[in-house]
Amino acid sequence: MLNFESIPIYWANRLSAMTRRELTNRFRAAGHNISPEEWAILLLLWRQDAQNPGEMSARTVRDPTTMTRLIDAMVRKGLVVRRADPTDRRRSSICLTEHGRTMEPVLIALAAPMITASLDGVSKDDAETTVRVLSKMIANISAAKKGER
């Protein structure tokens, strides 16, 4: 019988579920109707504004239909706008609004205590190893999906 607790993916999935629930609770308690999925998009845009939805879909591991739905919701909330690509009218860029920009310090301040608590008792080396291993596992799954493995 397979011991699922010995599989890193089990723990990654459990951490993901707990993180999503905790972020949702923290954001809502502070009066912000922003989902963890929208938070992930905001993190990308805060790092680099004006991104293509397809690129964001790949970076957040969301299918294009889900990405479109998330962006639509964020447009309605006034966090982002769609802008036509001046060189190709079939493409658009997703850009932060002023409201979307001002949410960065607010949401980061709400998420930071959870992130800090999650790393309590974890050495810097262990955290770096965890990131490296999870990144490698993601690359392995991506390669297998593309038929490279």
Image (cartoon, rainbow, N blue to C red):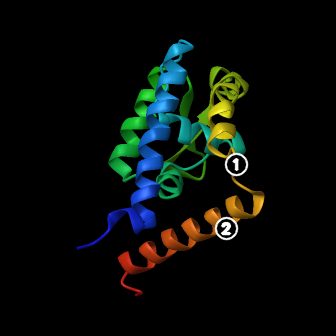
Which label sits on residue 46? none
Crowding at mark 2 (Cα within 10 Å: few <14, some 14-19, many 20+)? few
- Callout 1 secondary element: loop
Q: Quadrant of the C terminus?
A: bottom left
On screen, residue 80 above or below 44 = above
Using residue 6 as the reference point, say whether residue 134 is left or right of it. right
Q: Earlier in the sequence, mark 2 or mark 1?
A: 1
Residue at left offset 50%, top offset 39%: 19
Please, which residue is most extreme toward the bottom here?
Answer: 149
On screen, residue 134 above or below 54 = below
Is the Cβ of the residue at disc 2 closer than 8 Å to that at disc 1? no
Residue at left offset 62%, top offset 34%: 114
* Residue closer to the observer: 94 or 109: 109
Which label sits on residue 121? 1
> In this orientation, does residue 33 appear?
yes
Residue 79 location, quadrant: top right
Residue at left offset 45%, top offset 21%: 76
Q: Amino acid at mark 2?
A: Thr
Which label sits on residue 129? 2
Crowding at mark 1 (Cα within 10 Å: few <14, some 14-19, many 20+)? few
* Residue closer to the observer: 8 or 33: 8
Using residue 5 as the reference point, say whether residue 49 is left or right of it. right
Using residue 26 as the reference point, say whether residue 65 is left or right of it. left
Residue 47 location, quadrant: top right
Residue 103 location, quadrant: top right
- Callout 2 secondary element: helix
Q: Position of residue 29 (x, y in %)?
A: 52, 14
C-alpha gap between disc 2 and disc 1: 15 Å
Residue at left offset 49%, top offset 18%: 28
Circle 2 or circle 1, nearest the eye:
1
Q: Amino acid at mark 1?
A: Gly
Q: Quadrant of the N terminus?
A: bottom left
